């Protein structure tokens, strides 16, 4: 699943892959879970998840693909 390191109670996640982001967005879009509960289950701030969802809604999957590619190449 996700690589996480526990450092004194704080969890630092590695960057999410495109597949992981799309899976999380799909979980939200099915309507069975809310943004906050999904974000909590992943250990990320809910605004991060909300940003992914909004990017996908406004710009489509291409925006998320470009962002993941840019992060990977950096």
Image (cartoon, rainbow, N blue to C red):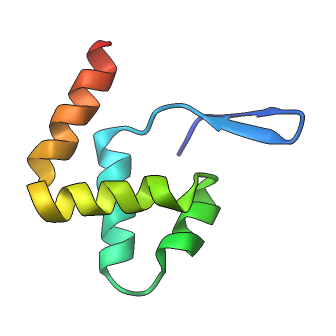
Q: Locate residue 2, reporting x and y percent.
A: 55, 42
Left/right placement of residue 40 relative to residue 5 reads: left
Task: Locate residue 9, reporting x and y percent.
Answer: 87, 42
Q: Position of residue 38 (x, y in %)?
A: 53, 68
Residue located 43% across and 39% down the image? 16
On screen, residue 52 above or below 67: below
The picture quadrant where one finds residue 29 is bottom left
Would you identify the image quadrant in which residue 70 lies? top left
Which quarter of the rendering shows the C terminus? Answer: top left
x, y (%) of residue 14?
Answer: 54, 31
Give left or right: position of 17 versus 46.
Answer: left
Q: Residue furthest top?
A: 74
In the displayed image of the protein, which residue is found farthest to the bottom?
A: 32
Q: Residue at x 36, y 38 (%)?
A: 17
- Residue 8: quarter of image: top right
Q: Is residue 36 above or below residue 43?
A: below
In the displayed structure, would residue 43 be above or below residue 9?
Answer: below
Q: Is residue 16 left or right of residue 12?
A: left
Q: Nearer the viewer, residue 35 or 16?
A: 35
Residue at 30 percent across and 62 percent down: it is 53
Q: Residue furthest right?
A: 8
Q: Which residue lies at the image location 33% right of the left edge and 64% below the top edge?
A: 25
Q: How many marks?
A: 0
């Amino acid at each position: 699943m996700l690589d996480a390191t526990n450092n004194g109670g704080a969890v630092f996640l590695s960057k999410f892959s495109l597949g992981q982001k799309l899976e999380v967005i799909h979980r939200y879009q099915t309507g069975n879970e809310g943004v906050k509960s999904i974000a909590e289950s992943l250990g990320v701030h809910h605004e991060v998840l909300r940003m992914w969802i909004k990017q996908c809604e406004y710009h489509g999957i291409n925006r998320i693909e470009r962002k993941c590619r840019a992060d990977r190449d950096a």
